[in-house]
Image (cartoon, rainbow, N blue to C red):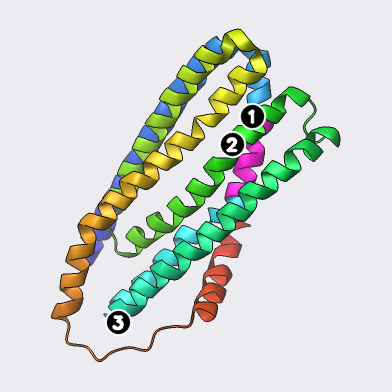
Amino acid sequence: MSSDKFLRGAMILTLAGLMVKVIGSVNRILLSRLLGGEGIGLYQMAYPVYLLLLAISAAGIPVAISIIVAGFLAQKDYANVRQVFRVSLRLMACVGAVLAVCLVLAAGWLVDAGVITDARAYYSLIALTPAIFFATILASFRGYFQGHQLMTPPAVSQIVEQFIRVVTMVVLAYVLLPYGLEYAAAGAAFGAVPGSLTGLVVMGCFYRYYRKQWQTDAVKVQAPAAELVRSRALIKRLLLLALPVSC
């Protein structure tokens, strides 16, 4: 039964990843026709910086959270399952906020130092900063659900996030194009913000729905009260699992 659930979850995530890729491909075609080579170039100067910061902050965290949550669930230690979620959520919120602020402060330096070779890409860098915060928190939710072997919520959130992102990118790029390519590229970059925020809202709704079921399961299990893992030890364990994946 567990094997069937795992295979079904893997299939759901695979199909979701395929849909996300298809939507992203359509987006690239539309943006290329709208912005042209120069506008796409401005967008592509900023977006890899966002992806790098996202990889540093969130790439390995969902895997780490899912491993730890699954381990506590196997022991029916529901108190520490909740503790993992609380600690990881606080950790990711802090990391996301710090990296977002760092990008705002470093954007000007990246341009002045020549790391970003076109000063017009500065607006795209600034537009992406809120997305780092939301996407980092979103990674915590996805890892928590994957630890419960619930793959549908992360899959749905990925599809909704990508769809909203693409729609926002195209609309803002079209609306801002008359004001200049730099603003149109920044509008396209800003699409990551409502996308990640919408994905976070979707995961929050799923969490609210499943929380009642998890509380019921915890009540049914007549297990002795477990000692909560200390936050510092839990953060250390999360980082030890997440850093190799992020690298």
The answer to whether residue 32 is visible is no
Residue 34 lies in the magenta stretch: no
In this view, which residue lies farthest toward the bottom? Answer: 224
Q: In which quarter of the image is the N terminus?
A: bottom left
CA neighbours of label 3 inside 10 A, class few (<14), some (14 to 19), many (20+): few
Q: What stretch is highlighted in magenta?
A: 44-54
Is there a contact, CB below 8 Å, between mark 2 and mark 1?
yes
Task: Where is residue 102? Give x, y as percent.
Answer: 69, 49
Q: Where's residue 225, x and y in %?
A: 28, 89
- Residue under label 1: 124
Q: Is residue 56 depicted above or below 66 in this figure? A: above
Query: Which residue bears the numbered disc 2?
Result: 128
Say what amino acid the circle numbered 1 marks: Ser
Q: Which amino acid does label 3 sit on?
A: Gln
Tell me which label, 3 or 1, sits earlier in the chain: 3
Q: Name the residue under label 3.
A: 75
Which secondary structure lies at badge 2?
Answer: helix
Q: How far apart are marks 3 and 1 (CA)?
A: 47 Å
Specify the label residue 188 is tagged with.
Answer: none
Distance (Cα) linking label 2 and label 3: 41 Å
User: Depth check: 81 or 120 in front?
Assistant: 120
